[in-house]
C-alpha cells in the first residue's frame, strides 16, 4: 500500500478571557473569519472574529472608489446655462375711469 502524507497547517490562537493557547486548522480559521460565527476555546470560552475580512474590506473600498469617481464625473460635466427668462409685461386690467372711458381712449 502506498503511503500518503497528510500535511495540515495550523493557526495558533490565544483565548482572550484566560491564558489558554490552542491551535485550529488553517481552513477552519479562514472559514471562521469569513462567516464570523462563534467558536469555543478548549476551556469553554466563546470566541469570534467580529471584524470584516480583507476581501470584505477590499470590496467596500472598491465600492467607495466607484462612488467617488461618479461624483467627480458629475462635478466635471459642463453645466448647461439657461438664458434668464424675461419677465412678462403685465397687461393693465381694463378699467373705466370716472369719465366712463377706458385708458386706451384717454391716450388719444
Image (cartoon, rainbow, N blue to C red):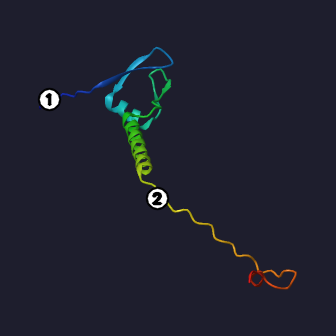
In this orientation, which residue lies closer to the viewer: 108 or 97? 108
Is residue 11 shown left or right of residue 67?
Answer: left
**In front: 17, or 67?**
67
Q: Residues within 10 Å of mark 2 (few under 14, many from 20)?
A: few
Is 79 in front, or is 42? Answer: 79
What is the secondary structure assignment of the residue under circle 1? loop
Q: Which mark is residue 3?
A: 1
Q: Measure how far apart labels 1 and 2 are at the Cα level.
A: 76 Å
Is residue 87 rendered to the left or right of residue 9?
right
Q: Which residue is at 45% across, 35% downward?
A: 36
**Mark number, residue 60:** none
Q: Residue furthest top?
A: 19
Please tell me whether residue 25 is drawn above or below residue 96 in the rendered image.
above
Q: Nearer the viewer, mark 1 or mark 2?
A: 2
* Residue drawn where x is 39% and y is 42% of the image: 65
Looking at the image, residue 105 sits to the left or right of residue 34; the answer is: right
Q: Is residue 62 left or right of residue 97?
A: left
- Choose between 63 and 91: the one closer to the eye: 91
- Look at the numbered disc 2 and give the secondary structure of its residue: loop
**Percent x, y of residue 2:** 12, 31
At which x and y percent is residue 46? 50, 27
Does residue 63 sit above or below 78 in this rendering? above
Q: Quadrant of the N terminus?
A: top left
* Farthest residue, direction right: 98
Q: Which residue is mark 2?
A: 80
Mark sitting earlier along the chain (1/2): 1
**What x and y, as percent, mark residue 101?**
82, 85
Amino acid at each position: 500500500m502506498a503511503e500518503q502524507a497528510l500535511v495540515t497547517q495550523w493557526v495558533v490562537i490565544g483565548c482572550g478571557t484566560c491564558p489558554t493557547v490552542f491551535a485550529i486548522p488553517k481552513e477552519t480559521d479562514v472559514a471562521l473569519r469569513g462567516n464570523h460565527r462563534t467558536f469555543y476555546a478548549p476551556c469553554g470560552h466563546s470566541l469570534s472574529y467580529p471584524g470584516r475580512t480583507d476581501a470584505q474590506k477590499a470590496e467596500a473600498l472598491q465600492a467607495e472608489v466607484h462612488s467617488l469617481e461618479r461624483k467627480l464625473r458629475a462635478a466635471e460635466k459642463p453645466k448647461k446655462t439657461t438664458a434668464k427668462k424675461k419677465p412678462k409685461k403685465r397687461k393693465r386690467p381694463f378699467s373705466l375711469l370716472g369719465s366712463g372711458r377706458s385708458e386706451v381712449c384717454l391716450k388719444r
